[in-house]
Amino acid sequence: MIDKQLLYVAWQQIRSKKSGGGIDKISVEEFEKNVDKNINRIHLKLNNHTYLPEAYLEISIPKDENEKRTLGLATINDKIVQVAIKLIIESRLETGFFKTSYAYRPRKGAVKAIKKVQKYIQNGNIWLAKCDIDKYFDNINHERLKRQLKPYIKNNYLLELIFMFIKMGYVKADNNWQERHKGVPQGAVLSPLLSNLYLTPLDQRMNDKNVAYVRYADDFVIFAKKEEKAQNILNETVAYIQKKLLLQLNEGSYVKHTQYGFKFLGVWINQNNLTLPEAKINKIKKKLKNKFQHDTYPDKYFEEIQGIRNYYAKIVPQHILYPIDEYIIELWKNKLSKISELKTKKQIKEATKDLTFITRLYNANVNSHRKEIVNFVYEIKHQKKIETAEQAVKMRRKIYEEKAVENTHLQIAGFGKSIGVSKNLISIKEKGKIIQKLSTTNLRHISISAKGVSVSTAFIRFCTKNNIVVDFIDKKGKPYAKIHRFDSLHPQLWLKQIEYATQPKGKEIARKIVLAKINNQIKLIKYFSKYAKKTEKDIAKELPAILKTLEQIKEKAKKSSKENTDNYKAYLMGLEGAASARYWQWVELMIDEETDFSGRHTKDAQDLVNQMLNYGYAILYRLVWNSIIKHGLHYEISFFHAYRKNKGTLIFDLIEPFRQPVVDRAIISLINKKTKLENPDNILSKPTIEKLVDAVYKRLTAFDKYKKERNRLIDIIDKQTEDLKSYLLGKEKKFTAYKTTKW
C-alpha cells in the first residue's frame, strides 16, 4: 500500500522544509541521525496495520488583533506518513475537482483566482454575492467527508488510516487530551486536500448552473450581471451550505455592486482596480517586523519577503507596495543601529549584503538604499553635536549629494543578453527572461562589454532622448562604437579648432593642459606621501628630489609661452614626458611592496597595474568623448597631442588633467587597502574590473572646485569642455584647464 521508497520521498519533502516536530519533541535533525531505522519501523507498522498516529500538539497563532487560530502540529513520523498518503491520493482526487477551485492545487493559486475575478467583472458580471462560512476547517462533518472520499480509495485500511489522522485528538504541553468529533486539523498535511474535496459538491453545483464563481479554500465569490440573479444565487447557496454541507455561515451575507469594492484573498477589488487595504499593509509590516526580531536574519524573514513578492507583487500595482519597501529600510536601519559590533562603514555594508525588496524599483536601486542604510547607521553610531546651522546644512547636503549621483553608470557584461526599456526602467533579459530591472533616474552613461548583446529600438530612442550615452567596449575598456544624439554637430566650431590649432590661442590651450597635469601630479604625490613617508624610508628619501624636479618642470611650462620654437607641441610634450617620468618613479616607490609595477607601459601591457591604468583611462576617454560630442567639438582636432587618424587626439588633450585625481588615485587607493586584484592569463578578472569601475566612478562623483565653483569631477570634465568651446568661439577670454585643489 505504502512502499518504503515512497516513505523516503515523503521524508525528503519534510526534510527540505525543515519542518518542526510535534508532541514527541523529535526534530528533523534527530530523525535524520537514524533515518533508515526510523523509515523501516514506520514501514513495518504500516504493513502490519499497527501504526498508531500521535496526538497533535496544540498551539495558537494570531489570526488578527482580536482572534487566534488553533493549529495541530504532527510528529515527524506522522508527517511522513501523511505526505506519502497525499502522494497516493492527490492525483485521484484532482480528477474530480473543478477549475473554479484555486487553493492548494498544482498550477492554480491565489494570483490566478484574482485574475479570474477580474475577468468576470470585465465581462459585465458587476454584481457580487458573498457569504462567509463560520470556522470551516473546524466544522467539516466527518461522516459526509468519508462518503465523499470512499469512491477514490478502495483500500479500506488506507481510508481508516486517513481518518485516524482526521479524528486524532489534540494535547497541549501538559498532555491534557481534547477530543475531536468534527473538522480537520489545521496544520496537518492532508487537511488542505480534504477540505477542497469537501466543498467540491458546491463547485459542481455552481458549474451545473453556469454561475460566475471563484473559490479559494472556504473563501468564495459569486458574480452575476443582474442584482436579482445575484440575490437568487446567494439565497440558494446559503441554503445548500447549511442543509447539504452541514456548515454554518457567519452573519453578513450580502449582494452589492462591484463599484463599491470588496475584499477577496487580502486584496481590495474596486470594479477592476486592485489595491491593499491599509489594515493589510500594516499587517504585512507587523509580520515582517516579527520575523526580523532576531540576532541574525532568519530564513523566515526572507521567506516572508519572497512570499509577498510572489503573491501581492504579482497582483497589485507596484506603487501600492512602496510603503512596505520603505518599512523594510526602516527595519534594517533600526536593527543595525543596535548591533554594537558594527562600527565601520565596511562592517555595516557587509551586514546589508542580503538586503532585498519586494518591488522592482526598490530592487533596481538596492545599492542606493544600501548606502542610505549604511550612512544612517554610521551617522547614528558616530553622532556629532550639531551646533551651527551651517554644520547642519553641510551634513544634510552631503547625504543628498551622494543620493544624486547614485547609479549614474551602468556596465553590462555577459554573453547573449538583450536590453530594452519599459516605463522608465531598463530591463535586461537573458534567454528571454528578465533578470534585472534598473531605474534610470540618475543614469547618464551605459557601457556594454559583452558579445552577442542585442538592444531594442525603444532602448536606443529612450537613451538618445534622455542624453544617456551608450558605449560598446572591448575587454580592455576601449570603445569601438557609441550611441548618442546626432543634433550636436557644430561645423563652425570645427573650423575654429583648425584655425587655432597652430596659432597662439591653440598653444595657450596646450600649455594650460600640461600645467594642469603637472600640478595634479604634484598634488597626488603630496596626498599619498603625507602618511607614507612616515613609515616608508625610500619614499621619505626620494620625495624631496621628485617634487623639486616636478616644480622645476612646472616653472618651465609656465614660461613656455615665451618660446618661439616652430615645434611648440614637441617642446611641451618633452616637458610633460619628463614630469611623467619622475611621477611614475614615485608611483613605483609607492606600490612596490604590493605589486610588480616597474614603470608605465601603455601598449600590450602585461602587468596588473598597467592593465588597470589602461582600463581606467579608457573610462575617462569615453566620458571626455561624450562631452566633446555634446558640445559640438571635433574629437580629432587637437592642440597638444599630434594628429593621428581615428585616435581622438582632442580626447587625449582633455583627459590629461583628470588622470591623476580620478584614475591614479582610485587605483593606488585600491592597492593600499590591499584589495584583492587579479589578472589571470594577463587579462583583468571580472571582479577586478568591477572593483576598478566602482572606484573610478566613486572618484568621478567626488567634489572639487573648477573656476571657483564646487562641482563633481564628472561635471568638471563637461565644464572644461564647455569652457574650451566658449574660448574658441570668443565667449571666454581664457581657457581654464582643471587643477585639483585637494591633496
Image (cartoon, rainbow, N blue to C red):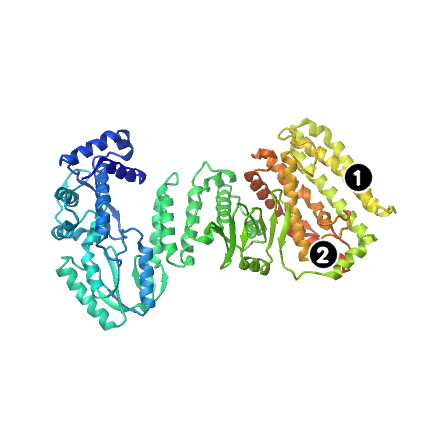
Say if 213 sits above or below 450 in the image. below
Left or right of residue 525: residue 190 = left
Is disc 2 placed on a helix, strand or loop?
loop
Position of residue 171 measured from the top left corner of the image (x, y, whole percent)? 17, 41
Which residue is nearer to you in this view: 180 or 502? Answer: 502
Write down the residue under mark 2.
633
Q: Which circle marks residue 553 in the picture?
A: 1
Amino acid identity at mark 1: Ile
Amino acid identity at mark 2: Leu
Q: Quadrant of the C terminus?
A: top right
Which residue is nearer to you in this view: 347 or 219? Answer: 219
| Mark 2 crowdedness (10 Å alpha carbons): few <14, some 14-19, many ≥20 | many
Is disc 1 placed on a helix, strand or loop?
helix
Q: CA distance from mark 2 to mark 1?
A: 30 Å
Left or right of residue 303: residue 76 = left
The residue lying at 73 percent from left, 55 percent from top is 724
Position of residue 83 measured from the top left corner of the image (x, y, whole percent)? 24, 42
Q: Is residue 673 visible?
A: no
The residue lying at 38 percent from left, 48 percent from top is 306
Of badges 2 and 1, nearer the viewer stands: 2
